[in-house]
Amino acid sequence: MDDDELLRYSRQIILPDFEYQGQEKLKKSRILLIGLGGLGSPIALYLAAAGIGNLVINDFDSVEVSNLQRQIIHSTESIGQEKVISAKERIQAINPLIQVDVLDKKLTEQELSEQIKLADIVVDASDNFQTRFLINRLSCKHQTPLISGAAIRYEGQISLFNASEQSPCYQCLYDDNGQQEDLTCSANGVLGPLLGVIGSMQAIEVIKFIVGFGRSLSGRLMILDAKQMQWREIKLAKDPECPICSR
């Protein structure tokens, strides 16, 4: 690590339990981030600023004016641009020292599987159950830790699913029976800063897991009611009948 890096990351390097060794771990890590919307925006910005060595970003949408209320990685000048291109420009403006790989299409199951296998952690910032269930299944297959977040209207939630431990997976929480209703921001609305809170927490969980300090959210679901500004914690148990993680 050169002098420029030491100065850039100095405020976290001096933290107890982080230090120089923690920064080196971040520099060597590869993170797969799926979705560059309201959640993906703060996740990408904070991971880039923290010095994640290789950030792989995936989205296949373009920036629309209605995105700008909450998707803070994009700007008015980005309207019409592919989200991954807009995001990469902003990421590199914040930290040109990291490597950013762009996946600007809807990945096939095989392509997604290969990317999850390569990653140290996958961060789910997608907006539909079909994608979340697929990411969970492939994360379990490759034993890649999954940090999942979601937010709609005034409520957000976050958890970490670690298939390498005896902890529950995403499907232990939500049964993939085809009856889950996708709640979209366009139909239901969402408070912009709520996505910033949940996305920032996802970034924290990535950093904690890579560096190796603190208590993770494995086996715990954190739920935020932003209207009442109240957090709830639900303990998650592994489903012995889960078709994904209990095989």
Image: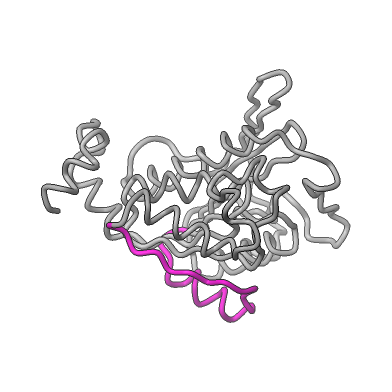
Q: Which picture quadrant has residue 62?
A: bottom right
- The answer to which of 200 and 77 lies nearer the viewer is 77
Residue 36 vs residue 129: left or right?
left
- Does the magenta portion include 116? yes
Q: Which picture quadrant has residue 126?
A: bottom right
In x, y percent, where is residue 99?
Answer: 34, 64
In x, y percent, where is residue 175?
Answer: 78, 55
Residue at (72, 33) in percent of width and height = 155
Quadrant (top left/top right/bottom left/bottom right) for the C terminus: bottom right
Residue at (74, 38) in percent of width and height = 190
Counting every numbered tag in the picture gives 0
The residue most toward the left is 3
The colour scheme used here is one colour
In x, y percent, where is residue 217?
Answer: 52, 40
- Does the magenta portion include 90? no
Residue 221 sits above or below residue 243 on the image = above
In x, y percent, where is residue 64?
Answer: 69, 55
Residue 217 vs residue 195: left or right?
left
Residue at (17, 44) in percent of width and height = 20
The residue most toward the right is 179
The residue most toward the front is 77
- The answer to which of 60 and 176 lies nearer the viewer is 60
- The answer to which of 188 and 120 lies nearer the viewer is 188
> Magenta residues?
97-121
Residue 85 vs residue 247: left or right?
left
Residue 204 vs residue 28: left or right?
right
Q: Which picture quadrant has residue 53?
A: bottom left
Residue at (77, 46) in percent of width and height = 185
